[in-house]
Image (tube, grey):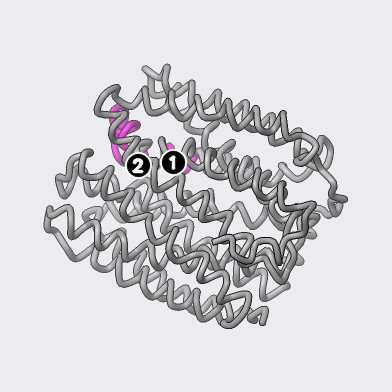
């Protein structure tokens, strides 16, 4: 993985990136522990349709928070903003451990949704400040490999924690991981404090420039499609497999860990290919087609065999890993760390994906069974190939 690390990262940034990779790994475990259990946790208090409304509302508020986040960063620095975000993120997780009423669950989910999105924006700025265009693919995909390693380890741990201590213990462990992250921020302050002169650009002007730029507009739509898929993966696939197909949490934890392995195997090679040989468009197209096939299988197959579902989910994540790697590589090749307004708008695709995904699920389940959501998403992935015609390869 690090064979050429010294060649494309200068000495000053080498330690900063090492610290950021470690932070990304720990933060990913903390974020992933509650990710696949939130929907089932909320389903204890409210109906499936209300779960969708909870997530829609939480993500609408998240979009608003992201929109105003650049001004906060510009005024108080990215380093200070990250520390505040971490504190509130930990408080949200602790709130879920105390939840006995729907209103407290809703408040905690909203706060968790907002802060878990904002902290990754802080991380984006830090990583991009260490990157050069010729090495963006490798730096970003190594960074995402550490993040994905955390996501792979978390589902099995999460299912084990549910088994021995219900949902509360899972949220508590996730909150506990915030402490070492915060301490790293404090003790590595001289490496992580801001050295960036952020561009002062209004939200309206940033949106206008992004819309008029075909490359930015195209990659925004691809990122949105990927996050719509992730919304279904985090909220509705666990519910469907557990309640509709009848697979227990012991099996689901192992399945969810296994399905994430492609993120370790695929992203770094894809980043190297994008930097040296192929264009990002071709790799994204392959990823979208693979995701569409996997989603159709998710709709069509009714067997309760865990191994079969593990293979289908594994296939879906091969496609998602290819799209994710190229989404990050392409976007951060055409912008810089100082373009904080563009980074924030780009990161609204995560909560927007959840809003659209939850809205689709609510609408579809009014008329059809839940598995029709996956058929509709498969069609969306194929339609999404048209977005690739908007962008021009960086090679």
Q: Quadrant of residue 173?
A: top left
**Residue 178 to residue 292: above or below:** above
Q: Are marks 2 and 1 in contact (CB under 8 Å)?
A: yes
Residue 279 at x, y percent in the picture: 58, 81
Q: Is the magenta stretch mostly helix, strand or loop?
A: helix
Camera-side residue: 103 or 91?
A: 91
Q: In which quarter of the image is residue 242?
A: top left
Q: Is residue 292 part of the magenta span, yes or no?
A: no
Task: Using the rendered image of the protein, determine whether residue 211 is visible from the camera's viewpoint.
Answer: no
Task: Using the rendered image of the protein, determine whether residue 79 is visible from the camera's viewpoint.
Answer: yes
- Tell me if mark 1 has few (under 14), some (14-19) or many (20+) residues whose alpha carbon lies within 10 angstroms of its own: many
Give the secondary structure at mark 2.
helix
Q: Give the range drawn in magenta.
A: 40-57
Disc 2 from disc 1: Cα separation: 7 Å
Instruction: Tell me: 128 left or right of 361.
Output: right
* Residue, disc 1: 32
Camera-side residue: 25 or 321?
A: 25
Query: Which residue sits at x=85%, y=54%?
Result: 199
Give the secondary structure at mark 1.
helix
Query: Which residue sits at x=58%, y=28%?
Result: 180
Camera-side residue: 163 or 344?
A: 163
Query: Which residue sits at x=63%, y=69%?
Result: 330
Q: Is residue 50 part of the magenta span, yes or no?
A: yes
Residue 8 at x, y percent in the picture: 71, 65
* Residue, disc 2: 155
């Amino acid at each position: 993985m690090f064979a050429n690390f010294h060649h494309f990262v200068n000495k000053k940034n080498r330690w900063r990136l090492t610290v950021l990779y470690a932070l990304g790994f720990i933060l990913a475990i903390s974020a992933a522990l509650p990710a696949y259990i939130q929907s089932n946790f909320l389903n204890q208090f409210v109906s499936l349709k209300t779960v969708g409304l909870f997530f829609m509302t939480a993500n609408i508020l998240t979009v608003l928070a992201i929109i105003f986040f650049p001004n906060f960063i510009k005024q108080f620095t990215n380093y200070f903003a990250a520390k505040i975000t971490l504190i509130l993120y930990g408080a949200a997780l602790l709130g879920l451990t105390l939840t006995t009423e729907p209103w407290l669950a809703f408040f905690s989910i909203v706060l968790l949704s907002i802060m878990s999105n904002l902290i990754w924006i802080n991380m984006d700025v830090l990583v991009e400040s260490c990157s050069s265009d010729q090495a963006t693919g490798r730096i970003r995909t190594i960074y995402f490999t550490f993040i994905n390693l955390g996501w792979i380890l978390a589902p099995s741990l999460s299912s084990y924690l549910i088994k021995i201590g219900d949902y509360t213990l899972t949220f508590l462990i996730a909150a506990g991981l915030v402490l070492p992250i915060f301490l790293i921020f404090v003790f590595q302050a001289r490496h992580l404090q801001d050295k960036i002169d952020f561009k002062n650009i209004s939200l309206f002007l940033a949106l206008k420039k992004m819309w008029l730029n075909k490359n930015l507009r195209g990659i925004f739509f691809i990122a949105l499609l990927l996050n719509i898929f992730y919304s279904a993966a985090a909220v509705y696939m666990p519910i469907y497999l557990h309640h509709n197909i009848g697979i227990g949490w012991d099996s689901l934890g192992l399945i969810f860990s296994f399905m994430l392995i492609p993120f370790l195997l695929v992203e770094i090679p894809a980043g190297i290919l994008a930097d040296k040989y192929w264009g990002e468009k071709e790799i994204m197209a392959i990823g979208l087609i693979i995701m569409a096939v996997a989603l159709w299988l998710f709709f069509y197959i009714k067997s309760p065999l865990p191994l079969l579902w593990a293979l289908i989910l594994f296939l879906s994540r091969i496609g998602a890993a290819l799209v994710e790697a190229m989404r990050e590589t392409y976007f951060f090749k055409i912008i810089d760390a100082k373009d904080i307004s563009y980074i924030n708008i780009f990161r609204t695709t995560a909560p927007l994906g959840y809003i659209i995904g939850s809205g689709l699920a609510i609408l579809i389940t009014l008329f059809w069974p839940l598995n029709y959501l996956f058929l509709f998403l498969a069609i969306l992935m194929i339609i999404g190939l048209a977005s690739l015609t908007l962008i021009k390869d960086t090679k």
